[in-house]
Image (cartoon, rainbow, N blue to C red):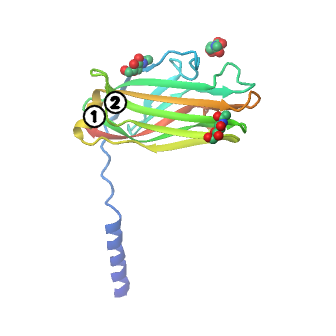
Amino acid sequence: MLHRLILSFALFLTFAVAVPAPAATPTRPPKSAVTVNAVAVDAPDVDTNGSGCRQGTVGVAFNSDNSIMTIILDDFQAAIGPQAGSYKKRAFCRVNATITSPGWAFDVSSVDFRGYVNLDGGVNASLVSRWKWIDTSKGVDLKGKGNINKKLAGPYSDDFLLHKDGESSTGEQSACQKASAMFQISISASLSASSSTVAGFVKGDSVDSTFGEILNLGWRKC
Ligand SMILES: *[C@@H]1O[C@H](CO)[C@@H](O)[C@H](O)[C@H]1NC(C)=O
Ligand SMILES: *[C@@H]1O[C@H](CO)[C@@H](O)[C@H](O)[C@H]1NC(C)=O
Ligand SMILES: *[C@@H]1O[C@H](CO)[C@@H](O)[C@H](O)[C@H]1NC(C)=O
């Protein structure tokens, strides 16, 4: 009995040492402290004909506890081949989000990027997303940029989910500069085909047909 008790105590100790104390409740601003003021997207260009990125089809939102920011593109699609119709082989969207969070700043801890890809043999897709902060008063980029970059070769037909950790600020000053900076994220999908008879497309995933990214945020009080 005593042995068992000692053993369980020893196990408990090991457990207590090996497992960090439950993380302190993450610091996050209250719901009302974060506002998305403006979401600006670049005007359509000839290359993409604005695919997926017209004003009004792009949403930026925070969840109820501000732990996540989502970027939703309602109509992001690239297509190549005989059935491509009016879609282009490249879709591109650059979003400038002006966010107000007085006294608070965030780092992007990680990003999940999802959508659906369907490629014949002989067709490749390249998916790229980049994010960064811009100090608009000085016109310079701040520390904390990141990117996701993935190439897929057909035949391929599946939802994709790409995950990438973000770069954290090195200290309070570098984090808090972001409180007044503009957040910019770009998303692109490009297709290439070995002949004019093979086809492929990239679009929103099969779950809710939207294309988008989920950004997990690490907040800091400034
Ligand atoms: C987004 O921000 C960049 C950098 O400040 C700027 O050059 C570009 O014109 C902005 N785009 C829109 C649509 O406001
Ligand atoms: C560009 O998009 C518009 C609106 O979807 C469409 O009417 C037009 O045909 C497209 N132009 C080209 C060159 O594909
Ligand atoms: C697809 O990617 C493969 C591997 O990188 C490359 O060898 C091939 O030329 C690419 N094909 C097209 C059509 O871009």
77 relative position to 198: left or right: left
Give the image quarter of residue 204.
Answer: top right
Give the image quarter of residue 200.
Answer: top right
Task: Report the residue marked by disc 1.
Answer: 104
Give the image quarter of residue 154.
Answer: top right
SS label for mark 1: strand
191 relative position to 110: left or right: right
Q: Residue at x 72, y 27 (%)?
A: 81
| Ligand 1 - quadrant of the structure image | top left
* Residue farthest along the right direction in this orientation: 197
Foreground of the two, 2 or 74: 74
Foreground of the two, 57 or 107: 107
Kind of residue at disc 1: Trp
Check contact, mark 1 vs mark 2: CB within 8 A.
Answer: yes
SS label for mark 2: loop
Q: Residue at x 35, y 33 (%)?
A: 31
Kind of residue at disc 2: Val
Q: Is residue 38 visible?
A: no
Foreground of the two, 161 or 198: 198
220 relative position to 199: left or right: left
Q: For residue 34, which numbered disc appears in the image?
A: 2
